[in-house]
Image: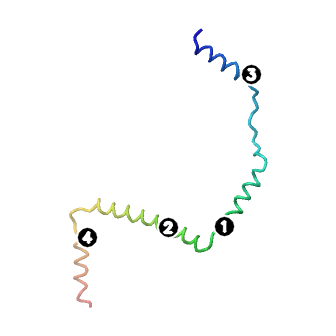
């Protein structure tokens, strides 16, 4: 028997002899107290901080939307002008009404 098998058998035997205590679902002693104490230690957020947080999130979302629409517009542009001829003709035809 080589060294590896001897050590393997020692590890298996010690694992078999170990007391198996299944972990419980209960929280450790004082856990709820620590959670509540940590929550109360944090200062309350002011109304200005809440609005600033909301505004930054909205600004980030709008920036993503703006960049995606700009990329879509840049990729979908063909050789056409931005004003189609019927629109230009409609403006010229109704100019006599002014």
Q: Dot 2: what SS?
A: helix
Q: Quadrant of the N terminus?
A: top right
**Dot 4, crowdedness within 10 Å: few (<14), some or many (≥20)?**
few
Residue 74: image location, x then y, percent: 29, 62
Can you name the residue that lies furthest to the right here? 29
What whole-number distance in Å separates the C-alpha atoms at marks 4 and 2? 30 Å
Instruction: Name the residue located 67 percent from the left edge and 63 percent from the top edge.
Output: 42
- Report the mark closest to the observer, 1 or 2: 1
Whether pointer 2 and pointer 3 mark residues with C-beta atoms closer than 8 Å, the reply is no
Provide the residue designation for mark 2: 58
Instruction: Name the residue located 72 percent from the left edge and 21 percent from the top edge.
Output: 16
Closer to the chain start, of discs 1 and 2, is 1
Can you name the residue that lies furthest to the front here? 3
Provide the residue designation for mark 1: 43
Provide the residue designation for mark 4: 82
Q: Dot 1: what SS?
A: loop
- Report the mark closest to the observer, 4 or 2: 2
Q: Nearer the viewer, residue 5 or 48?
A: 5
Closer to the chain start, of discs 1 and 4, is 1
Residue 61 horizontal side relative to residue 90, left or right: right
Rendering quarter of residue 87: bottom left
**Residue 17 bears which disc, if any?**
3
Q: Nearer the viewer, residue 63 or 78?
A: 63
Residue 85 horizontal side relative to residue 46, left or right: left
Number of marks in the image? 4
Rendering quarter of residue 33: bottom right
What whole-number distance in Å separates the C-alpha atoms at marks 1 and 4? 54 Å
What whole-number distance in Å separates the C-alpha atoms at marks 4 and 3? 81 Å
Q: Nearer the viewer, residue 94 or 66?
A: 66
């Amino acid at each position: 028997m080589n060294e590896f098998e001897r050590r393997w058998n020692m590890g298996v035997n010690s694992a078999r002899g170990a007391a198996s205590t299944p972990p419980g679902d209960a929280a450790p002693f004082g856990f709820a107290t620590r959670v509540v104490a940590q929550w109360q230690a944090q200062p309350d957020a002011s109304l200005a901080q809440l609005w600033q947080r909301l505004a930054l999130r909205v600004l980030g979302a709008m920036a993503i939307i703006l960049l995606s629409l700009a990329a879509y517009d840049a990729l979908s542009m063909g050789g056409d002008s931005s004003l189609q001829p019927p629109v230009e003709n409609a403006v010229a035809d109704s100019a006599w009404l002014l």
